[in-house]
Amino acid sequence: MAQQHHDLTDPTAGQVTGDALAGYLRAQATEFLRALRLHRETGGATNGGRNGGASANGGRTAAAAAGGGRTGERPLEAVDAARALRRSARRISGSLHTFRPVLDADWSEQMRPELAWVSGTLALEHAYEARLERLLTALQRLSGSSSLPAQAVGTHHATASERGQLTVGAAKAGALLERQLTLARTRAHSTALQALGSARFHAVADKVAVLASEVPLVAPAADLRPLAAAAQERLTDAVTALPLVTAGSPYNAEALVHGLSPDPPAPHPQDAPWHQVRLLLRLHRYAREVLLGGAAPLDVRLLQAGQALDRHRDASEAAAAAAQAARTPRIAPATAYALGVLHADQRHEVEAARYAFQRTWVKEAVGLS
Amino acid sequence: MAQQHHDLTDPTAGQVTGDALAGYLRAQATEFLRALRLHRETGGATNGGRNGGASANGGRTAAAAAGGGRTGERPLEAVDAARALRRSARRISGSLHTFRPVLDADWSEQMRPELAWVSGTLALEHAYEARLERLLTALQRLSGSSSLPAQAVGTHHATASERGQLTVGAAKAGALLERQLTLARTRAHSTALQALGSARFHAVADKVAVLASEVPLVAPAADLRPLAAAAQERLTDAVTALPLVTAGSPYNAEALVHGLSPDPPAPHPQDAPWHQVRLLLRLHRYAREVLLGGAAPLDVRLLQAGQALDRHRDASEAAAAAAQAARTPRIAPATAYALGVLHADQRHEVEAARYAFQRTWVKEAVGLS
């Protein structure tokens, strides 16, 4: 049963009981503990002093700062371990939410916020790093000096002087963003280290260790499928409420409507429903993993929809970071101009991501019906 | 024959001789003279002192400057008359080009640059006015304070504080653009007035008056159709050379590739082939008018393609004006930021216009085949 690719709401399919959930949770808990061990071994917790606050960007020139590339020097294994930790924490937390009625309620209610705290705290450092990389890459592209996307090759007539050069404004904007986001990342790193060493985290890890062998099911014989179907329905409802008609009409210019509004830049009110759908899509994906087990076939459309929403979130936050940087006192007009172009560019990325989601979703809906 | 809607290259259709061209040129010359008379009567040449240079914007606040709306106070009749003058000058000039072999060559070669000078000189004032209006409207939209396009209604959740407000940066950017473009428009107005009063213009007007009764055909019996077909072919070839695959892929981010390039902002090299197609499309349209006569059916797709290219040109020049304004010395960072957002917004309009052209053109190509 678990190996069959079926619609979760299909009433003719057989039951899936608590056993499947217990197996899934045990596997994720084991993965959490493995990642935690790996993280400790690979120095994830030992390099907190490497980026000492204000000196983090001291030795880099503005041109190098805007030159793109990875800004972190953490060992790749530590990055992978932190990602695996977040990944399993999210899956456990999400499953606890979706399948709450079949689990011990007190345990579940206590566990979920703690897991959300772990994955949220660990996610921040990576988010700042990725945001900086996205913004520096965009600055390169906007300066006509990056390699172009494949589709644009042959249509582009850059002169030699246009390549490998950044305007003063773009270089200064890059340096400013690097300074601000590196500082934020360094702080997030310290916070994550403190968190991982805290009694609170040890308590979470202990509970996960127990979960790896003993899942507190209260209704092991209950059918999980209605609960998964409800999660899918929450997703579908939220998608239905999105402005998909607008999103599916290219160049609707909706994402930049408040590009110069006097309100603080983040969070952008029109982005919130999309962020919400992103979370609900994730819960649906995890529920699907629980029901279909390890042999769950890859749903390409679900994957693409999720990637579009990730891109939406990343571009939204990058646009806010550019707007925020433009509020730095005493910056040069050329720097502010470059940040304005960059902000608008990222808001168009937001719009492009909505368009991509709409296309994927319509295809998916047709495919399912 | 002339009333039939046919492909200009259709070999089964009958000949169209020089008579059709003579009739068309006489009609356009008459229209030119009528518009000139109207322009003189409606004060097109009498209000040059109304906008005395630097004082043009003296009494307006920044908020009013960014408040959109028509910035000119010329009588509508004078505006219409100037437009009609340009319109007929372009048609005569274009027909002289396309059908040159059947017309007196010396006369034709002398006449064309003079007509181009007239329409070019008269176009500038209107262009600056339209550019300012486009930019102020965009600033309103980007501040979330304008009425939204119909398709976006219902998807927009502006709070009360978001309406009717401009940031300081947007207001200052609007005031700066108003100052610069009003000054440019005032200068263009003076130049146009001088031109209309010059001996050079009177010589052109005299020649057009002769043309209204006497068209210098050298081959009245020649078939115009191959010449019109050649004009159509030049258009088709130029369109084929456009990066239409990229343009047809929404959110390709191509138009902003040089958004921060260190080169001067205008003219944008990647825009030039599109501007060229715009001119060739116009020549094709005029040739079609000559062949099909007054009963030429409206070709909606040709019209839409032309509108997309007009929008492309307007957005391209508006983006350049925003970039240019950002180079004004001693502007505030908030002003520069707003101009950066505005520049990127207009470059996306450029991209949107290319997309619209591609869609229209593909439809048209399918329709013709």
Image (cartoon, coloured by chain):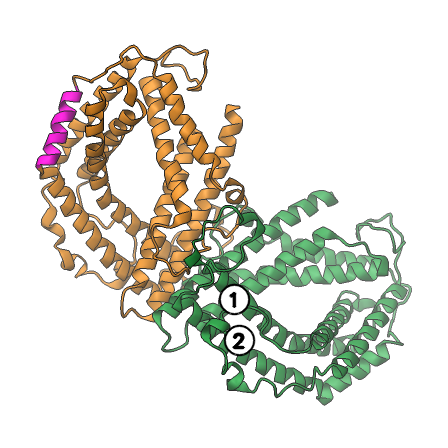
Chain colours: A green, B orange
The residue pinned by badge 1 equals A135
Front-most of residues A282 and B32: B32
Q: Position of residue B206 (x, y in %)?
A: 11, 27
At horizontal 41% and vertical 41% (from top left) the residue drawn is B274
Are discs 1 and 2 less than 8 Å apart at CB? Answer: yes
The disc, 1 or 2, on the residue closer to the chain's N-terminal end is 1
Q: Amino acid at mark 2?
A: Leu
Tell me if B295 is positioned left or right of A59 in this view.
Answer: left
Q: Outermost residue toward the front?
A: A160
Q: Position of residue A280 (x, y in %)?
A: 68, 61
Check if residue A104 falls in the magenta segment: no
Q: CA distance from mark 1 to mark 2?
A: 10 Å
Name the residue that disc number 2 marks: A181
For the question of whether residue B137 can be seen, the reply is no
Instruction: Output the chain of dot 1.
Output: A
Prevalent SS, magenta region:
helix
Identify the secondary structure beneath mark 1: helix
Q: Examine the rendered structure and indicate whether residue A177 appears above or below residue B262.
A: below
* Occupied quadrant, residue A197: bottom right
- Residue B288 left/right relative to A237: left
Q: In the rendering, at what x and y percent does residue B208 appear?
A: 16, 25
Dot 2: element = helix
Residue B277 figure quarter: top left
For disc 1, the neighbor class at 10 Å (few under 14, some 14 to 19, many from 20) is: many
Q: Residue at x 50, y 85 (%)?
A: A54
What's the residue type where badge 1 is placed?
Leu
Q: Residue at x 76, y 77 (%)?
A: A111
Respond whether the residues carrying marks 1 and 2 are from the same subunit. Answer: yes
Q: Of residues A124 and A339, which is closer to you in this image?
A: A339
- The range drawn in magenta is B199-212
